[in-house]
């Protein structure tokens, strides 16, 4: 395994490209337009500079990392990749379209991984002629900092594929856990309903600061669930809850009505300046 193709250079794709290059892989990043690619390359450059300023990574690594990353708007430029990691927006039809094309263009031996946080790996792999080589590689944000990589195997994913991505993840410095292909996998399955429950507490009249302090000091969480929800994005939280609700058809995952109202009001959390807390 030497060459990794990353599809999408947004928040996650740019981080995945950087950790892949740091681990010594040759990386090609594919975007849908030159403008998006330019934005993605700038994002990577800024992240790299900030990681070095914070001494998370060393100055000496900078040039090496940067030399290993190339950008392109053509999937064909990664056709000899050993592993593809897709990080396009969380919509099944988008991902299936990308995987259909990857299956045609990328060499038949390559593993095709998705960074989806909630979609079915079976449904993504099902549009390809190599579902045994399709796997979930769920990184956490910010990718260069977070230690966990959740590997998700569908009914069709082979053991060989799972073992190969486990080794690659470890080479990237991540600790891996293995999850079955059910909505929310493991981390979000537990975390997301907890954040939803905290929103119910707010709807019932409790103060966000009180709830967060309770979980920080009473359960030793580094960050309270409402602050975390603001950072994740309330729109993303709502979407993930809807996937769980739909996937299990179980009312315990029903999004709290207050969460829905906040998203409707454009209060997405930190990224819009207002969520359970104000960031202005
Ligand atoms: N944001 C998070 O905290 C987080 C955490 C874990 C997993 N994820 C998952 O990672 C994936 C990406 O999320 P993100 O937050 O990086 O999104 P994002 O919107 O920041 O980035 C998506 C990128 O994909 C590009 N893109 C769209 N269609 C494309 C195509 N056909 N070919 C190439 N590039 C294309 C877009 O231009 C954009 O740059 C989603 O599946 C999301 O659920 C996100």
Image: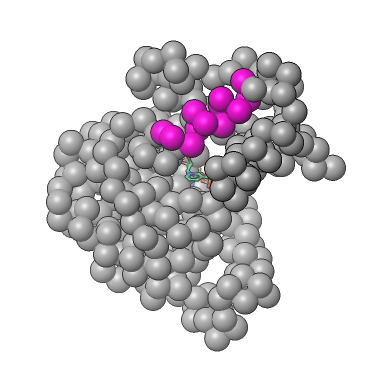
Where 41 falls versus 181 (above or below)?
below
Q: Position of residue 179 (x, y in %)?
A: 29, 43
Relative horizontal placement of residue 261, taking residue 113 as reference (left or right): right
Quarter in which the N terminus is drawn: bottom left
Q: Is residue 25 above or below residue 199?
A: below
Percent x, y of residue 122: 25, 34
Farthest residue toward the front? 218
The residue segment tinted magenta is: 189-200
Q: Residue at x 74, y 36 (%)?
A: 209
Q: Residue 143's x, y, as percent?
A: 51, 57
Q: Is residue 122 magenta?
A: no
**Residue occupying the point 18% across, 36% down:** 155
- Of all residues shown, which one is farthest toward the bottom? 60
The answer to whether residue 215 is seen in the rendering is: yes
Could you tell me which quadrant the C terminus lies in?
A: top right
Q: Main secondary structure of the magenta part?
A: helix
Q: Is residue 239 above or below residue 160?
A: above
For the residue pair 28 and 115, the one nearer the viewer reads as 115
| Residue 135 placement (x, y as % from top left) | 27, 46
Q: Between 209 and 8, which is closer to the camera in this rendering?
A: 209
Q: Residue at x 39, y 54 (%)?
A: 149
């Amino acid at each position: 395994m030497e060459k990794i193709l990353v599809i999408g250079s947004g928040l996650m794709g740019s981080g995945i490209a950087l950790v892949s290059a740091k681990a010594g892989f040759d990386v090609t990043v594919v975007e849908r337009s030159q403008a998006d690619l330019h934005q993605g390359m700038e994002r990577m450059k800024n992240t790299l500079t900030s990681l070095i300023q914070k001494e998370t990574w060393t100055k000496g690594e900078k040039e090496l990392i940067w030399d290993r990353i190339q950008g392109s708007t053509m999937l064909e430029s990664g056709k000899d990749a050993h592993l593809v990691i897709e990080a396009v927006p969380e919509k099944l039809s988008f991902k299936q379209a990308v995987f259909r094309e990857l299956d045609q263009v990328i060499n038949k031996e390559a593993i095709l991984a998705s960074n989806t946080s909630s979609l079915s790996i079976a449904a993504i792999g099902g549009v390809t002629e190599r579902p045994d080589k399709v796997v979930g590689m769920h990184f956490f944000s910010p990718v260069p900092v977070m230690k966990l990589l959740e590997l998700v195997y569908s009914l069709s994913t082979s053991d060989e594929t799972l073992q190969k991505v486990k080794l690659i993840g470890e080479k990237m410095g991540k600790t891996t856990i293995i999850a079955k292909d059910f909505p929310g996998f493991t981390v979000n399955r537990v975390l997301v309903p907890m954040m939803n429950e905290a929103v119910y507490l707010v709807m019932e009249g409790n103060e966000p600061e009180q709830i967060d302090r309770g979980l920080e000091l009473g359960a030793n969480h580094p960050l309270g669930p409402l602050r975390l929800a603001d950072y994740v994005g309330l729109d993303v939280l709502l979407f993930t809850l809807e996937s769980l609700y739909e996937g299990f058809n179980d009312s315990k995952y029903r999004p709290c009505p207050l969460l829905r109202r906040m998203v409707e009001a454009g209060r997405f959390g930190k990224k819009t300046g207002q969520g359970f807390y104000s960031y202005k």
